[in-house]
Amino acid sequence: MERDNINIMIIYILWLRQIKRYLRSKSRLIGSLGQPVLFLVALGFGFGPIYAKAGGGNYIQFLAPGIIAMSILFTAIFAGIEVIWDKQFGFLKETLVAPVSRITIMFGRTLGGATVATIQGLIVFIITLCIGFRPASFWGAILSIVIMFLVAMLFTALGTAIASRLEDMQGFQLIMNFLVMPIFFLSGALFPTIGLPEALTIITRIDPLSYGVDALHNVLSGVSGFGLGLDLAVLSVLVVIITIIGAWQFSKIEI
Amino acid sequence: MQENLSENIIEVKNLVRNFKEIKAVRDITFCVKKGESFAFLGPNGAGKTTTIRMLTTLLEPTSGDITLNSFNAHKNPNETRHSFGIVFQDPSLDTELTAYENMYIHAVLYGLKKEIYIKRIEELMKMVELWDRKDDLVKNFSGGMKRRLEIARGLLHHPKVLFLDEPTIGLDPQTRNYMWNYIKELREKEGLTVFFTTHYMEEVDKNADQIAIIDHGIIVAQGKSEDLKRKTNTTNLEDAFLALTGKDIRESFGSDGANRMKMWHGKR
């Protein structure tokens, strides 16, 4: 009982640390909004007329959930990758010599990173409202927060698992170009995944973000590909699996 | 060796650590007595930091036993971790947080109760003269201030042993002097055991009761400063150190040492 309380306090304090770091780095907060805004405006209004002509309807309605998912993906992966910073700048050692299990530490920081990514998603959500996006229903908008958090947990844990294996930031570019970008572009965030070439269809089915984007489309735009049940099931199972892998990789860190 | 065993707060037996084919630490055995100030010396890449990493449970030994405060470091890592505090060679503070927040996180990580840590944090931060800067972000601190904060943090959970890995590197003489006086006071007051590494031999002469010198992963000499000087027929500790470990610079000499240096490079 006593031990449980201590563990909860530790998870809370590591969560709080991530939140404080996020709120204090204003440049990071604002800088990370530049990309989604650019995508929304350039793609949203740029492809809007063609999309409408092709019979797709309002492109902003389609694009907004995808861009929300994108901002969560990037923020979450980045929050996970921060483990490398902590390795290089030393704070990780402080947590690793403490009488705390590595799983608790990993869980606390992953929760913190995921919360930050969810907040980032919500800010982008508000921005999409400003440029004309209208969610299908109020309850859909509420449910979307749960989906955002699941996506955020999934990719923060993935980032942590990867960062636990890396020595320094040199591999970061590699991860961005060969993992994060493909996950984003092949997720159906920018285009509908119906009627794609077969190879691409398979890839979008493998891409975990596809299920997050589809779930957001489902609750925010009222269109469904895989069905909300399948989306939530896949996301939840993946969150559990990737968190376990992340915790396992994290527990193997030697510094 | 007929003092009873509980007198020894650290016991290291046949400790070995290999990194692939490189033998960083090869079979070292030593004891540190309760309340002692123990200097662990050696040239760069000799195995000092690897040993400290094993003693502080950051690294699993390849073989051998470590007992710290009568806990086995391998079998009871958490009890062992409660028993020591450490000031690392490189700062391990979160520079984006305030000094107080760094202390607070430490208190929570070590499971201290609120009524205890509120008092202790204030006490310790006043002692290292950082209380008036408690709400400043650590990134605005000088090297000496960070070091002082780390010492205060390392003592927050009242450890029995304090590890200091090159604690005075890059500090001015004033701060060095201040730090050692402070540690001396703590030892007298609390019976704290101090285990430290350094390259400044005058610090060792002034502050160490016992010295062990490690080179190429083995302990080449152990004793008081006078013992080492007598043994090597030298008049000061620096000469004794050089007599025991040779005058070659490690990066450029010996395939084994060179390999080890590569290991250490950027990965201490």
Image (cartoon, coloured by chain):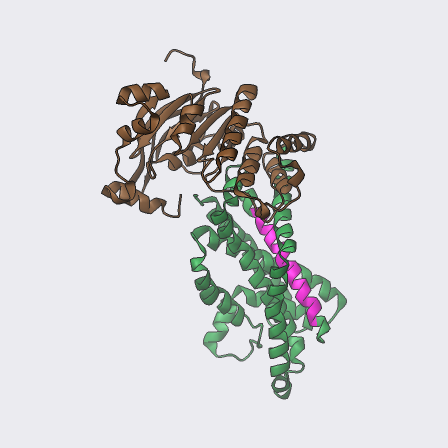
Residue B141's place in the image compared with A168, above or below, is above
Residue A48: x and y in percent read 63, 83
> Magenta region's main secondary structure?
helix
Residue at (40, 24) in percent of width and height? B205
Residue A202: x and y in percent read 48, 71
Nearest to the observer: residue A19 or residue B193: B193
Residue A190's place in the image compared with B187, above or below, is below
Residue A105's place in the image compared with A123, above or below, is above
Q: Is residue A159 left or right of residue B97?
A: left
Q: Is residue B4 left or right of residue B254?
A: right
Q: Is residue A23 left or right of residue A248?
A: right
Residue A169 placement: quadrant: bottom left
Nearest to the observer: residue A112 or residue A93: A93
Residue sticking out furthest to the right? A138
One can see residue B20 in this view: no
Residue at (55, 40) in percent of width and height? B146
Residue A119 colored magenta? yes
Residue A74 colored magenta? no
Please provide the residue range marked out in magenta: A107-128
Q: Quadrant of the image for the C terminus of chain B?
A: top left
Q: Quadrant of the image for the N terminus of chain B?
A: top left
Residue A113 placement: quadrant: bottom right
Residue at (59, 70) in percent of width and height? A35
Q: Is residue B78 left or right of residue A117?
A: left
Chain that is brown in the image: B
Chain that is green in the image: A
One can see residue B24 in this view: yes
